[in-house]
Amino acid sequence: MAHGHKSNEKVVFVGDSRVRKKSAPGPVTPPDYSSYPGKSEAFIPNFLLKEWMVGVVVLVGFLVLTISEAAPLGYPADPTNAAFIPMPDWYFLFLYQFLKLQYVSGSYVVLGTVGVPGIAFGSLLLAPFLDTGKERRFYRRPIASLLMFMSLISCFYLTKQSWDHYQHELKITNTIPEQILREEKAREAAEEAAKAGRPAGEPAPEIPLVDAKDPVVSSLVEQKAQCVMCHGADLKGNESSGIPSFHGIGDKFSKEELVDIVTNGKNNMPAFKDKLTADEIDQLTTWLAKQKAPAK
């Protein structure tokens, strides 16, 4: 057996050949740590690759949920709509409710918007550097586990409290959320289109005003009652603000219902019993009751 020029040189044979084994250039492949009980594997690249794979699976699942369940759409933003109740997305509800607390709102709003969230998210970033213990079982890490459970319970409690408060506001203001109102309008339009034999996406023909040149229009609608201030110059209202159109309103309400609405008000509409006389209310509601779709 040839050992080269040095007698103490170690020779590693490959098979039956007498070719010395050469070390491959580049990084050395980490060993299989499964053969070392109680030892952790190398963070880079082994553990990091697993983290990336889990992240990819979660991201794909999130995208599938996003595509399959479209976000509910409300009406375009309307700064004049005083009945609109703003609400953030569900994953920000806990922060939204948190900012309603006494000592993180008002004069302390900077503490609630920057201070407390900064400490919370900063602690998450520093956790790997502060918690350097080798123990990974949660019941052997009381401080870290307690903070984790307290955070989860707080987020769940604040989210539920925010949603319950939102439902309470809808109830006391008798408000229907925009996305539900929009779905109901779309369903009603589809049903009307089916009855009329029109394609589902085709808009309904516009209903003209009846007796548009009636003296009531100029004396009450435009001047004294000033209906045009809210219902618009064309009297078509604004669905996003819950303001109905005068076009075809006689098909939705009877003369008696219109008298009650004009006299006592309804939802966002003010009462006119102190602004109009009984005779003027009768003239106005009589004209409104005539606003019906043309007979076919």
Image (cartoon, helix red, strand yellow):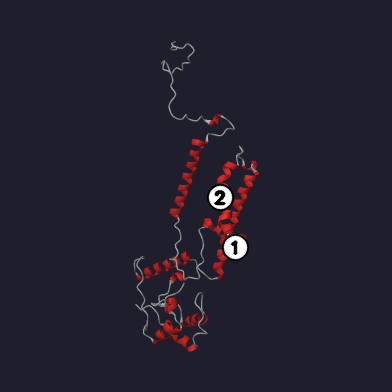
Secondary structure under tag 2 reads: helix
x, y percent for residue 138: 62, 42
Residue at (58%, 48%) from the top-left corner? Answer: 123
Disc 2 marks which amino acid?
Phe
x, y percent for residue 136: 60, 39
Disc 1 marks which amino acid?
Ser
| Residue 292 tag number | none
Question: How far, Cα to Cα, is label 2 from label 1?
Answer: 23 Å
| Quarter holding residue 211 | bottom left
x, y percent for residue 73: 44, 62
Q: Quadrant of the N terminus?
A: top left
| Residue 107 tag number | 1
- Residue 39 drawn above or below residue 254: above
Q: Residues within 10 Å of mark 1 (few under 14, many from 20)?
A: few
Residue at (52%, 55%) from the top-left corner? Answer: 91
Q: Which residue is mark 2?
A: 121
